[in-house]
Each structure stands twice: as C-alpha cells, then as structure tokens.
Amino acid sequence: MPTDKPPSEMSVGQVARRAGVPVSTLHFYEAQGLIHSHRTAGNQRRFPRAVLRLIAIIRVAQKTGVPLAQIKDRLAKLPRHRPVTLAEWSALATDWRAELDERITLLARLRDQLTGCIGCGCLSVAECPLRNPGDSAAEEGPGARLFKTDPRGQNSSAGASSGLDLDIG
C-alpha cells in the first residue's frame, strides 16, 4: 500500500497537464487574478494543488458563457493559501445559484423563442415576444427602453449590456 502523499505544490507544467490547459492559459488566469502562485527561491512558479479545482470551475463557467469578471468576483470570496472547505464551496454555490438560475432561464427562453425570430425574420420591437412582449416598452414612451440599468436604476450611458438586454429599435 503506497504511503506517498502527493506534493502539496505543483509546477506550472504539472498543473497544465493535470488541468488539460496550455501553460499560457494558466499565465492568463493568474494575470487576471483568478488563480495564484508563488515563486520559489529559483524563481519558479508553484501552485497549490487546490488550484486544480479552481481551474475546473473557471473552465466550466467559461464554457457556459459566464464572463471572467463574474467568475473572478465569486472566486475572490474563497481562501487563496489553503484548500477550500466544504462549507466554503457550499457558500459559493449558494451565492452563485440565483445568478446561474437566471442565466439558465434566459438561455432557455432564447433557445425556445429564437427559432421563431429566425423563421419570420421580423425582429420587430412592437411584436417580438422575445424582446418586447405585447409592446410593453411603448408604455414608457419613445426611444430605447430595454437597456440594462446600473444599481442606481439609471440607464447605462455606455449602453453596456449583457446578451439579451440590447434594444436596437
């Protein structure tokens, strides 16, 4: 029965192989503040083994369209210099769940209604059930009404938006 314990730290190459990503991806994630390493006396990067879990979460979240800034915000709540506990993972999951559920709902709505828009080609602000059901935006007057608002409830001056929030009419 082997008693060899896996090393608590891994080189960038070891992490890349285990995570199935190029070394350049690890460098990018680190530059973005998503993962962290330290340097040895010989100036070599060393990552804690727990970074493998973080990379898995980052990759899955990216594949589902979650922006890196949102991933970073969530991961910033986790400890950097020790493995994450079950309670901490649970808190992260609970905290992120509502946002992910909303994303799933919007994606399902897009999937279910997009075929109709492509089929008819209308993209009509007045009639499109995806963008403006029942022309509800008309009640608020002329002009763009469907922009994402900032936390103060004001329209974004830059027109910044996420996915379905743009009004091109």
Image: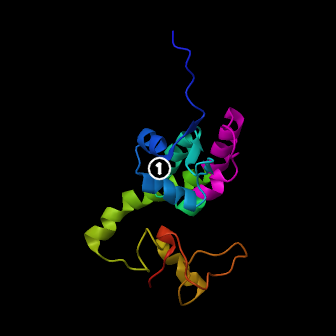
Q: Where is residue 91 in the image (x, y as percent from the top left)?
A: 70, 42
User: Taking 124 as reference, is 75 above or below it?
Assistant: above
Q: Where is residue 157 in the image (x, y as percent from the top left)?
A: 61, 85
**Colouring scheme, one of rainbow, by chain, secondary structure, one colour:** rainbow
Q: Quadrant of residue 94?
A: top right
* Residue interval drawn in magenta: 71-97
Q: Where is residue 57 in the image (x, y as percent from the top left)?
A: 53, 46
Residue sitting at x 36%, y 77% = 123
Q: Where is residue 25 in the image (x, y as percent from the top left)?
A: 45, 55
| Residue 64 in view | no
Q: Main secondary structure of the magenta part?
A: helix
Which residue is tagged 1? 59
Q: Is residue 61 magenta?
A: no
**Residue extending furthest toward the left:** 119
What secondary structure is found at the residue carrying circle 1?
Answer: helix
Q: Is residue 84 magenta?
A: yes
